[in-house]
């Protein structure tokens, strides 16, 4: 049981077409706490019909919603934002219970997630069209921006709340409706948000949370012609599959997929700042974010100093249940995730990697892994190509800007990159040379609602957050008026 000030935020029913529902056949799936294995409850296992129903209701609701003024829509989103922040403690507790991240981090995610509702409530009022100087006498040229319509979202477990508001915020603000399939590991965070959306006065049907069977739900979301856009955050293989599935109905798509972020420490860097940045970038959410540093490149001249300071700090990180005071590293989402890290560590060691700290499963339990640093890493290791999604940092030595740029960009992914330097010309050279949608210079964490988030290469399509995130939910309509 999760102890909450407002127990009504914990609901075990799905929210479909404005109604709280069970599965027609009564089928449910258990949700467990990854730290303890405790069963938190169940959620309905819904299928295609539930999505089809949600889409039908959403279509009707959206026709009315888009006619409301942006200010009216904004007021509801603002109210939703206020309610999320008022219930930050409870929403954080639900998240820690089902996702595992330390409670302060979970509450931080609630603030981050809510900020998208606030930002887009404001930004939705500033969706401007254009009047373009005419190309012919007697004609006038205008551009209108219109909501794309009913959108579907498939979201992951690593940011159970923020990955929904980052999509639903802009969609609802500009007049779209949204049907969401949350990850089955973390449905309660999504359902709690829906409780608050309802309380904020969001008209029924505009937001549905459909729990259930991923493949079936995904099939309906991608094949239903009434769904005009699919937005997905998750792994690259599933993203590719969904992109293919969307082809037959030519849907608009936004994809936030995997990353393989380089984190570069140049010889002129402030080493202590770089150590702090690399700790935050690598070990946030126990390494389970798509923008986590995956490969740490350290210049030969500062390699030993960095490695020593970094490993010393990592070895002090407290591991445990996210509800325990002072815990920095929670459990991984499941044992499979632990096996993946274990495999990458074994591979690295077999290819010459030297463990500076950690390297093994943690005594806290089957879902815990020791925060790990591996020196003498190289590009033959699996970790050079594959996202770790766990608390393991490989240190790779480099000797020049050209060499490190080549290695950093040697990836099919291009989501985030980081580097530490105090040389202005190097800062420009690396910032321009790195092939990724986000570049952090002398910072290890940079996600914010005011800036665009999204990937180059196979890390995705589209942007979320900021004014660019609004565009992803708008159609551009050219209106030509003749006979003037
Ligand atoms: P992860 O490995 O991090 O769980 P996934 O890409 O598998 O990443 O999961 C992200 C989201 O995609 C989850 O909500 C999951 O249920 C969903 N998902 C996984 N496979 C499919 C699929 N074939 N069709 C639709 N959704 C899917």
Image: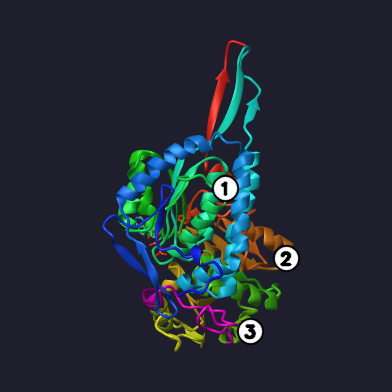
Relative to 189, does residue 451 appear above or below in the rendering?
Answer: above
| Neighbourhood count class around disc 1 (C-alpha, 10 Å): few under 14, some 14–19, many 20 upward | many
| Quarter holding residue 32 | bottom left
State whether the magenta stretch is mostly helix, strand or loop: loop
List x then y, in percent, for residue 211. 38, 58
Looking at the image, how many numbered discs can be counted on the residues? Answer: 3
What segment is highlighted magenta in the picture? 316-340
What is the number of the mark on residue 309? 3
Q: Identify the residue shown where x is 59% and y is 52%.
A: 465
Alpha carbon of mark 1 to alpha carbon of mark 3: how far? 38 Å
What is the number of the mark on residue 423? 2
Q: Which of marks 1 and 3 is nearer the N terminus?
A: 3
Helix, strand or loop under label 3: helix
In the image: residue 460, left or right of residue 401: left
| Neighbourhood count class around disc 3 (C-alpha, 10 Å): few under 14, some 14–19, many 20 upward | some
Name the residue that disc number 1 marks: 469
Alpha carbon of mark 2 to alpha carbon of mark 1: how far? 32 Å
In the image: residue 363, left or right of residue 265: left
State the colouring used for the structure image.
Answer: rainbow
Of marks 2 and 3, the one in the foreground: 3
Helix, strand or loop under label 1: helix
List x then y, in percent, for residue 321. 50, 81
């Amino acid at each position: 049981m999760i102890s909450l000030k407002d127990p009504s935020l914990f609901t075990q029913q799905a929210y479909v077409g404005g109604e709280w529902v069970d599965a027609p056949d009564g089928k449910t799936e258990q949700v467990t706490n990854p730290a303890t294995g405790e069963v938190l409850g169940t959620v309905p296992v819904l299928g295609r019909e539930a999505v089809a129903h949600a889409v039908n209701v959403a279509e009707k609701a959206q026709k009315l919603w888009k006619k409301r003024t942006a200010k009216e829509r904004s007021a509801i989103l603002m109210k939703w934002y206020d309610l999320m922040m008022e219930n930050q403690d409870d929403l954080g507790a639900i998240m820690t219970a089902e996702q595992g991240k330390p409670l302060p981090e979970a509450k931080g995610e609630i603030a981050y997630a809510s900020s998208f509702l606030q930002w887009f409530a404001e930004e939705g009022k500033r969706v401007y069209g254009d009047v373009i100087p005419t190309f012919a006498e007697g004609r006038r040229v205008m551009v209108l921006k219109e909501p794309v319509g009913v959108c579907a979202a498939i979201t992951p477990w690593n940011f159970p709340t923020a990955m929904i508001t980052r999509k639903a915020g802009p969609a609802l603000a500009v007049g779209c409706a949204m049907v969401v399939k949350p990850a089955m590991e973390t449905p309660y965070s999504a359902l709690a948000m829906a409780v608050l959306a309802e309380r904020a006065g969001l008209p029924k049907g505009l937001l549905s949370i459909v729990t259930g069977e991923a493949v079936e739900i995904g099939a309906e979301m991608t094949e239903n012609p009434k769904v005009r856009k699919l937005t997905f955050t998750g792994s690259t293989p599933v993203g590719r599959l969904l992109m293919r599935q969307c082809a037959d109905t030519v849907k608009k798509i936004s994809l936030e997929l995997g990353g393989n972020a380089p984190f570069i420490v140049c010889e002129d860097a402030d080493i202590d700042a770089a150590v702090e940045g690399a700790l935050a970038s690598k070990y946030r959410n126990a390494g389970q974010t798509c923008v986590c540093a995956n490969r740490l490149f350290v210049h030969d001249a500062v390699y030993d100093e960095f490695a020593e300071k970094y490993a010393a700090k990592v070895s002090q990180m407290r591991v445990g249940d996210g509800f325990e005071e002072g815990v920095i590293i929670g459990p991984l989402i499941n044992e499979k995730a632990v096996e993946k890290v274990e495999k990458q560590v074994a591979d690295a060691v077999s290819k010459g990697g030297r463990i500076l700290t950690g390297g093994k499963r943690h005594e806290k339990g089957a879902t815990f892994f020791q925060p790990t640093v591996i020196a003498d890493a190289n590009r033959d290791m699996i970790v050079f190509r594959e996202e770790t999604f766990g608390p393991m940092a490989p240190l790779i030595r480099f000797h020049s800007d050209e060499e490190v740029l080549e290695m950093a960009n040697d990836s099919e992914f291009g989501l985030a990159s980081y580097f530490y330097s105090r040389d202005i010309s190097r800062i420009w050279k690396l910032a321009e040379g790195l092939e990724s949608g986000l570049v952090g210079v002398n910072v290890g964490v940079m996600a914010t609602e005011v800036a665009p988030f999204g990937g180059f290469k196979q890390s995705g399509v589209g942007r979320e957050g900021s004014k660019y995130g609004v565009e992803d939910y708008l159609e551009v309509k050219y209106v030509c008026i003749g006979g003037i």
